[in-house]
Structure formats: C-alpha cells, structure tokens
Image: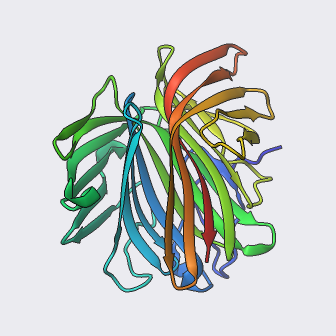
Amino acid sequence: METQELEGERLLFNEKGVQSLSGWAPFPLWKYSRSAIRGSFTRIVEADRYFLFSDMAVLVFEIANIGRMIYASVQISNMVQGATFYDAYRINTPIGMVDLPPSSVSGTVKIKQRNCSIDFSVMEKGSRLIKVDLPTFYGGTGLRGVVVLTPHENKDVIATVHPWRKDRRTFRYNLRNPAYRAEGVMQFGTEEILFTKDNGWGALDWNRGYYPHGQVHYLAIASGYSGGKQIGCCIGYGMEDNSRGSENAFFLNGRLYKLGQVTFRISPRDWLAPWYFSSDDKRLSMEFQPVIEHRIKHSLIFQSIKERRVFGYVSGTFVEDAGNAFTFHNVPAYTERQKLKL
C-alpha cells in the first residue's frame, strides 16, 4: 500500500538532521533547506527544469547545481524537421554557491552573464515566467524570448521524497507538474517558435537532494491535448527506494491520478524504435514513438552527468477512477536516461 502524507507542511529534516518520512503527496509537502544537509556539498544535487511542448517542437531549459558542476542549458528539438539544437553555459560563480530557491512555489533564479541571460520566476497564482536572451546560442544563431506557464486551476502536482536503499542519509526530493498552459514566443535566429492557448503546454521538473556517488534514472514526461482533454504524464524509476510511493502520475485536465510502478520497455539496440510503458495497476498502457535522439555529457574533475534524451509522441489508454478507458493520441513527449557520478 502506497503511503500519502496529507498532514500539512513538514521539514525534510528534523533538528538532528534525520530525514522525515518519505512518500508522495499531491502538493509540495516537505520544506527543503540546503544548510540542513549533513554531508559533502559535492553530493548535493539541485536543478530546475522546464519543458515547453507544442505539436511541432519541444524546448528544455535547465539550471543545475550538481556537486562541483554548475551550468545552464537549453535545447530545441524540432520534431517536424527532425533536428535538435543544444547549448550549455558554465555559470561563473564559486562552486556550490549558485542560488536555487529552497521552495518550488516561490522564488526566482536569474543567471546573467555576457553570453547568457536566463530568468525563471514564480509569479502570482503560481504562474511561471521563462525569459532568455542567448546571443551565442548554437554558434551565434541566437535565442531570445518570453513564455508564461499558467497552471491548471486544480493545482495538483506529484511530489515525492525517496531515499536510496544502501545509504539512508541520501534522498531525492522531486516535484513535477506537466499540466501547464504555455503562451509566448521564442525567437531562434529568424524562426519564431510560438506557444499559444491552443498549441502550447509546459511541465516543471524540480529536484533537490543528497545523492549517492552513482545514480541511474529513467524519466518520461508528456504534455499536450487529445480527446478533448489536457493530458499530462510523468513516469520514471531509478535506484531509489520508492516502496512508500512511486513518482508516477497521470493528469487529466489538471487532476492527478496516482499510478503504481510503471515498466519501461526499450529496445537496447535502437532507441528510435517504439517504447512501451505499462503500469502494474493496469491503468496506463502507452506507446512512445521517438523522433529525435540526442546525447549530452557534462564533467568536472571526477564528477560527470550523462543524458540520453529522446523526443517524440505518446499514444495510449488510461483508465479513469470510474473505470472508463480514455484514449489519447500523439501527445508531445520527452524521455531520458540519466547517469550521474558524484
């Protein structure tokens, strides 16, 4: 039986530095404090990621403070042209000193350097602002623009805290919401990438944690519109102990439906072959049709992060609480395998 804590906000650590109860909740239940972590800063992981989806493209924006590595990155994947464009920017600040907010519901992250200006801001009523000005992006093509993400009125999210089995000092506090509407424009060279009420969706992936020396994690996020409803999906698995509640959830018109464990079936020889997902509670059966694959690596001294990113579309069936089967088609999606060495 999965545990859901609904007793109100609680500290992630008690006064002795011991982690509180792990599990999941449909809101940001735990209060995070970097200073409360008792351990080397080289194993602290903090990252804010935003995904922008349209029928034609997926954009990924990230600001990460991962051990010794501090960087921002942006990726544009045009799924009509089958092309992807990626750049990363080393943040010029002392190691471990980039200021990422301790809360997922408030605060601002601003990076301003000669070749990189990125602003992630939480506004009134939970809306979020993404503002970038990257004159050197992709060999000087340049990227600039503003997009506003508006949450659904239900305001459901999937928040989880998981420890690792072999080291109970470790944890990953993750919050995801794939149910935003996106409106705005990104200017990529001479091309405009538009996000409108009818063709613009967004997702937040917010992470804070104290990780083991090695970690492998799989993730799939989708956001779009199909069958007359707004669709959101975030599923994943890794080496953490998720016995008190998985990170898997499906969203219909902003409402969260919790899933059990989800099996990923990926062809080891060809990641551009269809992927298949199925939940152990028989509620979700989904196929992912890849379009673009891209590999990323960041490293500094003895630490590294490797990501294998795949962009495409998902289609499938979800069973609602009343037992009705809801079918969806061609919802834009993002998947990845992340290998982390700290």
The percent position of residue 82, horizontal first and vertical second, equals 42, 37
User: Residue at coordinates 46% horizontally, 76% vertically from top-left?
Assistant: 69
The percent position of residue 248, horizontal first and vertical second, equals 66, 42
User: Residue at coordinates 59% horizontally, 43% vertically from top-left?
Assistant: 220
User: Residue at coordinates 31% horizontally, 80% vertically from top-left?
Assistant: 92
User: Would you place residue 56 above or below residue 340 in this image?
Assistant: above
Q: Which of 141 and 222 is in front in this view?
A: 141
User: Would you place residue 203 above or below residue 87 in this image?
Assistant: above
Q: Nearer the viewer, residue 251 or 284?
A: 284
- For this orientation, the residue located farthest to the right is 1
Where residue 221 sits, quadrant-wise, is: top right
User: Number of callouts in the render?
Assistant: 0
- Which quarter of the rendering shows the C terminus? bottom right
Q: Nearer the viewer, residue 159 or 182?
A: 182
User: Residue at coordinates 73% horizontally, 49% vertically from top-left?
Assistant: 245
- Which quarter of the rendering shows the N terminus? top right
Left or right relative to 42: residue 127: left
The percent position of residue 163, horizontal first and vertical second, equals 72, 65
Where residue 339 sits, quadrant-wise, is: bottom right
Q: Which colour scheme is used?
A: rainbow
Q: Can residue 6 be seen in this view?
A: no
Q: Which of 314 and 242 is in front in this view?
A: 314
Q: Is residue 41 visible?
A: yes
The percent position of residue 252, horizontal first and vertical second, equals 54, 26
